[in-house]
Image (spheres, rainbow, N blue to C red):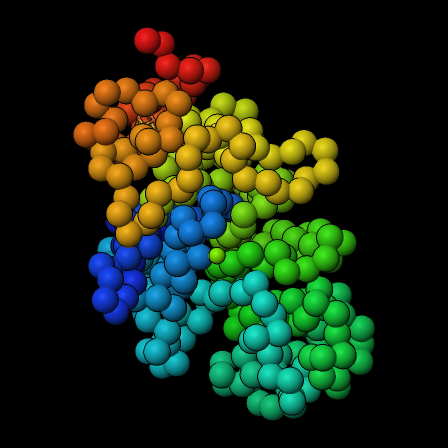
Amino acid sequence: TALLEATGVSVDYHRRGAPALRAVDGADLSLARGEILGLVGESGCGKSTLGRAVVGLQPAAGEIRFDGRPVVPLGRRRRDPGMRGLQMVFQDPYASLNPRRYVGDQVGDGYLLGGTSRPEALRKAGELLERVGLPADAARRYPHEFSGGQRQRIAIARTLAAEPSCIVADEPISALDASAQASVANLLVDLVRELDMGLVFISHDLSVVRQIADRTAVMYLGRVVEVGPTRELWSSPAHPYTRALISAVPRADGAGVLPVELPGDVPDPARPPGGCRFHPRCPLALPECSRDDPPLVALRGGRSVACVLQTPGEPVRPLATRRKD
Ligand code: SF4
Ligand code: MG
């Protein structure tokens, strides 16, 4: 059974004097223990919002279950120890750290919440700081004394004190310099393997996701449009959007520049196109694509896709270069 399972999740942002913006619209996601799921898509596709929704930080419609139980909204978490296993790591570690408190005390907070005594919490905090690769005296220093990469390690140590079985990390390395990016990504991978956790790794950086994710989920305009094992998804994308997205990833230097071969811009999420919402930009669109909105369906081999070109229960059909007229 899934560690984290989201079905038909929708999130509306209500805006004064404007129609509600449906940032996530019926998205599905599932994560197993010990698995890294990369969640990718262009900026504004709803991946951060979906990440916040699945950990209970963002009110959402639909069904979200963690360890078999409905996810409890953040405000009602304190009295629910079962939900402490579901944690989030953010892009900016500094924002989640208090500049005036010793790092060791802040990491120890997680243990205090779990009922551990203060001296014991501090001792365990020291161990965690060492585990994430910080110097032995880190506990007795302040956050500003550390580099960006080290601060993210502190934020991760703080999360680990809650003894999570599932972490949702939203662009956890995007604010870091290149060398810190690689080492913090490697740390997350090591922790997932060692602690048998699940990790949702939200990123606009496809080359990193390709390297670390067991499975990849692709979002477009509030929907998950394709999910599958990373290697297969890369070698034979089932959705034309996935193909466009990965074709834009430079091979050598890894710098992420998003789609080059897609015509037009991402449509206004407040007014998504009818039918398949990718149809105005899709090089393979059929006449019915402007009318029918394809659901996410399971194919063979652990693949899922929302596209009329694929047949449920069948292996992925290779995508044509362009539509035959
Ligand atoms: Fe393109 Fe049609 Fe598939 Fe949508 S359903 S991705 S428009 S072929
Ligand atoms: Mg984001």
How far across and how far down the image is residue 190, in percent?
A: 66, 53
Residue at image location 65% in from the left, 67% down from the top: 152
Query: 17 or 89: nearer the eye?
Result: 17
Query: 63 or 306: nearer the eye?
Result: 306
How far across and how far down the image is residue 21, in percent?
A: 28, 57
Residue, far top: 325
Query: 110 or 179: nearer the eye?
Result: 179
Q: Quadrant of the C terminus?
A: top left
- In the displayed structure, would residue 91 be above or below residue 289? below
Q: Is residue 155 visible?
A: yes
Residue at image location 75% in from the left, 74% down from the top: 146
Residue, far left: 291
Residue 238 falls in which quadrant of the image?
Answer: top left
Query: 59 or 191: nearer the eye?
Result: 59
How far across and how far down the image is residue 97, in percent?
A: 60, 79
Residue at image location 65% in from the left, 89% down from the top: 100
- In the displayed structure, would residue 172 be above or below residue 241? below
Left or right: 146 as drawn, with respect to 222 = right
Left or right: 196 as drawn, with respect to 143 = left
Residue at image location 33% in from the left, 78% down from the top: 76
